[in-house]
């Protein structure tokens, strides 16, 4: 059995080196085209790739004051990936801030509330018989239909308004309660 350390010494396939370096396979293709060292069998040694990428990143930083990196070059690819990483981090920070402010809701909370509201409707409809049968005695068929319709409308209105569910849903840290 080959351990991951031994595998790195033996050489990694293109997808494996991409995963190990945290980049896309296209980036690895660009590195290959720009002279990133490979083993005789065409595989990649993670330590050699890290060293090579580090040298290119240092050169990229040094050249930042100069003209932009040529399109398709390793320096341009590195700059592009660094920009994408910065943007992704900024978006994550914005989402975290909105969650903390209470101006955004976590999808888990939304799904939990949806399930709870559907269950409330189900429970209301399941309890309908025991709650309205006593009211139906002595009424005409038309009056019985009106009582049943009114009960169903009330259950659906509670669902549409959020019912009693909002009080039962636990809010996450930093989330305001329903009333403020």
Image: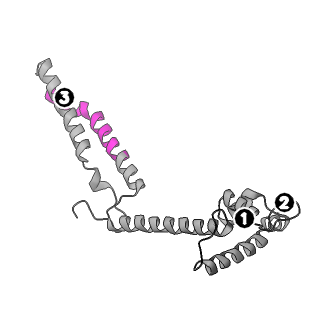
Counting residues from the start of the chain, the first of labels 2 and 3 encountered is 2
Residue drawn where x is 82% and y is 61% of the image = 43
- The circle on residue 42 is 2
Q: Is the magenta stretch mostly helix, strand or loop?
A: helix
- Which tag is nearer the camera, tag 3 or tag 1? 1
Residue 49 in the magenta stretch? The answer is: no
Q: Which residue in the structure is indicated by mark 1?
A: 31
Residues in magenta, as a range = 115-136
Residue 153 picture quarter: top left
Q: Which residue in the structure is indicated by mark 3?
A: 149
Image coordinates of residue 112 in percent, x first then y, are: 39, 51
Residue 176 picture quarter: bottom left
Counting residues from the start of the chain, the first of labels 3 and 1 encountered is 1
Residue 137 visible in the displayed image: no
Is 152 placed above or below 60 here? Answer: above
Residue 148 visible in the displayed image: yes
Marks 3 and 1, how far apart in space?
70 Å
In the picture as drawn, the residue positioned furthest to the right comes out as 40
């Amino acid at each position: 059995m080959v351990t991951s350390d031994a595998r790195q010494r033996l050489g990694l396939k293109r997808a494996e080196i991409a995963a190990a370096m945290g980049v896309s396979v296209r980036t690895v293709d660009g590195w290959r085209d720009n002279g990133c060292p490979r083993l005789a069998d065409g595989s990649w040694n993670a330590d050699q790739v890290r060293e090579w990428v580090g040298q290119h990143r240092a050169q990229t930083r040094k050249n930042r004051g100069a003209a932009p990196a040529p399109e398709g070059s390793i320096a341009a690819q590195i700059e592009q990936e660094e920009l994408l990483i910065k943007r992704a981090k900024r978006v994550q920070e914005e989402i975290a801030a909105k969650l903390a402010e209470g101006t955004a809701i976590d999808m888990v909370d939304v799904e939990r509330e949806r399930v709870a509201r559907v269950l409330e409707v189900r429970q209301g409809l399941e309890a309908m018989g025991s709650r309205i049968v006593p009211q139906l005695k002595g009424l005409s068929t038309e009056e019985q239909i009106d009582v049943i319709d009114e009960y169903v409308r009330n259950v659906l209105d509670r669902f549409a308004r959020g019912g009693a569910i909002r009080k039962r849903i636990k809010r996450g840290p930093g989330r305001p309660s329903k009333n403020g």
